[in-house]
């Protein structure tokens, strides 16, 4: 799992595709109204309080579109900001206007994820419970959305199916049970996490040597019982239907982690815009 913010992911390949999708054969309006030689500066505005995330990707957009465009940041990705200017774009006016939508889409989307993540992290502050994301991400944006979670103070769960083992109920249908599934998974040489729906499954996973147990859609009472039964022998992760209204109570049961799919699949984009100054 990764919790440090780290560098922004390189999305050059995807950004080229997004620019091509938006521009097509050309930016007809800009080419018709803006002289080739015109230059300008433009403010990147955040219109509501939140955690800014995506300024590094705005740089990537303009570096690919026109390297003459420069960006001066007034905040860093991961900063809590009030409404106002978080960066200024300088350079050829045509390039600045043509790249505006792709740049703002990324800035708004990722800032929304970072802002929502920070709300979850702040809600469980003092409990010792870590907020995790999930694989419920937008296709093509997983690396960026998981970076936004880190910018918001959350921690990444596995990046994909390739870097961690999580045995779920559908996997168990093809085995003789939890013990056999764990024994087979050991061949990968990585820690094995098992999803459990009942306290009986928790006991079986613990007895079979699971390295971590995911408590799926359990009530507060069941979570509390599982924490007492496991007694810190392996980390416990609560998951399923977690909201800002329920996350604090879940954390108080003593679980080590809470994974929240809503961080990425339900975050509202932060309201951002670009204001051009001749």
Image (cartoon, grey):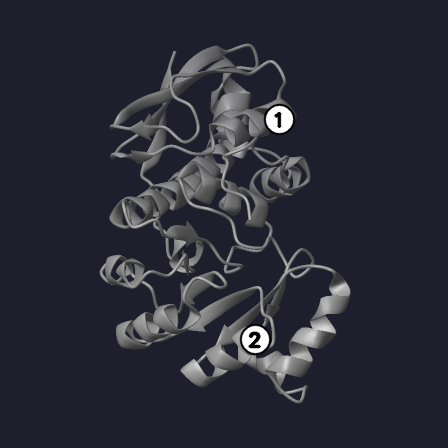
Q: Disc 1 designates what residue?
A: 65
Please provide percent x and percent y for residue 194.
55, 71
Position of 16 with respect to 230 (left or right) is: right
Residue count near mark 2 (Cα–Cα under 10 Å), binned few <14, some 14–19, many ≥20: some
Q: Please name the residue shown 45% across and 12% down the image.
A: 40
Q: Quadrant of residue 226?
A: bottom left
Disc 1 vs disc 2: Cβ atoms closer than 8 Å? Answer: no
Q: Is residue 43 visible?
A: no
Name the residue at 60% across, 38% down.
19
In the foreground, 106 or 112 = 112
Q: Earlier in the sequence, mark 1 or mark 2?
A: 1
Residue 13 x, y percent position in the rendering: 68, 39
In the current view of this chain or complex, which residue is farthest to the right? 187
In the visual, does 271 lie left or right of 240? Answer: left
Image spot of residue 167 (x, y percent): 60, 73
Q: Which residue is mark 2?
A: 168
Depth check: 148 or 67 in front?
Answer: 148
Left or right of 141 on screen, residue 49: left
Quarter of the figure with residue 216: bottom left
């Amino acid at each position: 799992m990764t919790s440090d913010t780290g560098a922004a992911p390189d999305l050059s390949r995807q950004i080229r595709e997004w620019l091509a999708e938006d521009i097509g054969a050309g930016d007809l309006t800009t080419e018709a109204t803006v002289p080739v030689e015109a230059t300008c500066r433009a403010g990147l505005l955040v219109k509501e309080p939140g955690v800014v995330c995506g300024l590094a990707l705005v740089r990537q957009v303009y570096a690919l579109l026109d390297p003459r465009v420069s960006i001066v940041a007034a905040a860093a990705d991961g900063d809590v900001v009030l409404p106002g200017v978080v960066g200024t774009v300088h350079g050829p006016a045509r390039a600045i206007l043509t790249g505006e939508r792709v740049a703002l889409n990324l800035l708004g989307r990722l800032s929304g994820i970072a802002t929502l993540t920070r709300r979850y992290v702040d809600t469980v502050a003092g409990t010792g419970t870590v907020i995790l994301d999930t694989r419920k991400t937008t296709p093509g944006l997983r690396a960026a959305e998981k970076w936004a979670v880190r910018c918001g103070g959350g921690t990444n769960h596995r990046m994909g199916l390739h870097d961690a083992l999580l045995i779920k109920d559908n996997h168990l249908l093809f085995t003789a049970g939890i013990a056999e599934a764990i024994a087979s998974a050991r061949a990968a040489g990585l820690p094995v996490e098992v999803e459990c729906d009942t306290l009986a499954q928790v006991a079986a996973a613990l007895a079979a040597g699971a390295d971590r147990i995911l408590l799926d859609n359990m009530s507060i009472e069941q979570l509390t019982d599982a924490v007492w039964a496991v007694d810190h022998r392996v980390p416990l992760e609560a998951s399923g239907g977690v909201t800002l209204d329920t996350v604090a109570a879940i954390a108080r049961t003593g679980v080590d982690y809470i994974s929240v799919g809503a961080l990425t699949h339900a975050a509202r984009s932060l309201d951002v815009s670009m204001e051009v100054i001749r």
